[in-house]
Image (cartoon, rainbow, N blue to C red):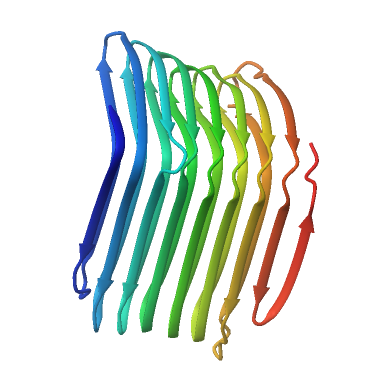
Amino acid sequence: GVARGGRVLGRGQQASHGSTTNNLSVGNTMSARAVEQSMNVDNSQILKGRVAATNVVPGGEARGVTQSAAVAHGNAAQVEGCCGTTDVTSEQIVHDGSTIQAGSAITVGSADYLVSGAQATANAFGGYTNHGYSDNSVTQVSGANVTAYSQVEACCNNGATTSNAIAAANTARWAGESATIFANVTQANRGAVAASSEVREKSATNVSSGASAGGNLAEIQNKWGYAQLSGEQDNAGAISSSSEVTLDIFNGFAMSGANSVGNSALLSNLGSDVSLFMDQNNRGDITASASLSASSATGGVGQVNASAVAKFFSSGTTKIVGNANLDIYGGLAACATGASKIKKSKYGGTAETENNTVGG
């Protein structure tokens, strides 16, 4: 499909007294599925415009589970094959100046369980193969500004509070079982990607907040079949994540975490060989910030984590006892020139590290 100069906006608003509010907005979407037959897929998706999903959930007392989830995709494609051969060629492009945004906000008084989540992706591709062969060539290019934010504000809660925000420019993921998977990926991002999560409560129990932002992400998870991931990833956009937890007093645990990555290539397999060959180049600044301001008079546990990575490359296979030897092949050519900055703060203390140049 082709969308030019368009605006896609979804909005949900309702009182929160034990409720579920879901919101999904997609610029272009494609889905293909074949069972016990071969399939050739040729996909082209182009987007220029705005895609947004926003939830606002207000309320007084929120008994039971109050849940809000907002998801926004610019281009989304999914291919599923069983017991046959699948040949995929996919191109997804989001033009410069486009905006992809997902937001979830819960504001209540006294509450039991609060769950808020937001996910925004410019280009998303997903493949699944069961007892078959899959050959994939995927190209993803994004110049969009991608933003995901999740917010929870409450007087107090008796159960648990969870807030998560995930933002990515390009994602390509495959999963398989008793399958042979070949995936060649070309990913390029030049837009800003930001994820933020925030929790504010006066009296809280078991609170977690997480934010994750990525430029280019490619991954294969397979079982009982050969898997190969190859290609190139280039990120020139600023990638940032921020998690903030502010509690007057809490019981149980309180956690705040933020993770940012420019390029990521992951390959895992169970019971068979793997090969991973990826060129990675990062020219954008990568930042992550996590904070926790709270106190506990009952032995509560607080944790803060933040990570900022220009490039991440990992491959592995698990050998089952009694099977033949398994081999892992891999190669990485990487270059990073952007700044990498991590900031953590807990109970008022602050620790900060900064690397102006990230090595290969």
Q: Is residue 127 or residue 122 the one in the foreground?
A: 122
Total labels: the figure holds 0
| Residue 297 appears in the picture as rendered | yes
Q: Is residue 160 or residue 233 the one in the foreground?
A: 233
Residue 220 x %, y %: 51, 29
Above or below: residue 176 compared with residue 290: above
Residue 345 x %, y %: 66, 73
Q: Is residue 280 or residue 97 the one in the foreground?
A: 97
Residue under the image location 33 percent in, 46 percent down:
51
- Give the image quarter of residue 34: top left
Quadrant of the drawing holding the C terminus: top right
Residue 272 x %, y %: 57, 20
Residue 125 x %, y %: 41, 31
Residue under the image location 27 percent in, 22 percent down:
32
Quadrant of the drawing holding the N terminus: top left
In the rendered structure, the answer to whether residue 114 lies left or right of residue 288 reads left
Above or below: residue 53 compared with residue 110: above
In the rendered structure, the answer to whether residue 319 lies left or right of residue 28 reads right
Residue under the image location 31 percent in, 34 percent down:
4
| Residue 321 appears in the picture as rendered | no
Above or below: residue 172 compared with residue 100: above
